[in-house]
Amino acid sequence: MAVFLLQRPIVRPLLLLLSGVLLAGCGRALPDIPGFAAPAWRADRYACGGHRAALLPPLLAARPRLYEARANDVTAVLGPPDEEELLAQTEKVYHYYLTPGAQCGPRRPHTSGPRLSIHFGPLGTVTEVQADPLP
């Protein structure tokens, strides 16, 4: 009986539509963060301008608001990550440098300077937000 229902012309498109709606509902949009200057953060790529450390406190104060946000929403607010780390089972971590360092030189080498790290789970939503201590 179930195989017969799946062969009907209207059932398959409805199942695809329902699947798309359910997947789109995973996570939630990133809300506005009071006191956070997102354009200034995005403009300070690799923290070479030295502005990100001053912009960090309002972002950390709003840390609970970041949980369950989607990767695309984080990128829309913070810009593309300075570094991206891919982990097992489709998990990933976005790293944003907080202070100028060797990453500002030619070829943008990896450094161990202070970073904001945003972890995404297998569903592509934020599961953890960490910031290294600033000097």
Image (cartoon, rainbow, N blue to C red):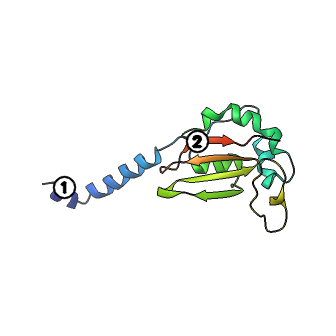
Q: Earlier in the sequence, mark 1 or mark 2?
A: 1
Whole-percent x, y for residue 15 in the image: 31, 53
Label 2 crowd (10 A; few <14 / some 14-19 / many >=20): some
Residue at position x 63%, y 41% in the image: 129
**What's the mark number on residue 128?**
2
Residue at position x 76%, y 57% in the image: 111
Whole-percent x, y for residue 69 in the image: 57, 42
33 left or right of 40 in image? left
Image quadrant assignment for residue 82: bottom right
Image quadrant assignment for residue 53: top right
On the question of residue 128 being in view, the answer is yes
Three-letter code, disc 2: Glu
Three-letter code, disc 1: Leu
Whole-percent x, y for residue 120 in the image: 55, 48
Distance from Cα at disc 1 to Cα at disc 2: 43 Å
82 relative to 57, above or below: below
**What's the mark number on residue 5?**
1
On the question of residue 36 being in view, the answer is no
Q: Quadrant of the N terminus?
A: bottom left
Label 1 crowd (10 A; few <14 / some 14-19 / many >=20): few
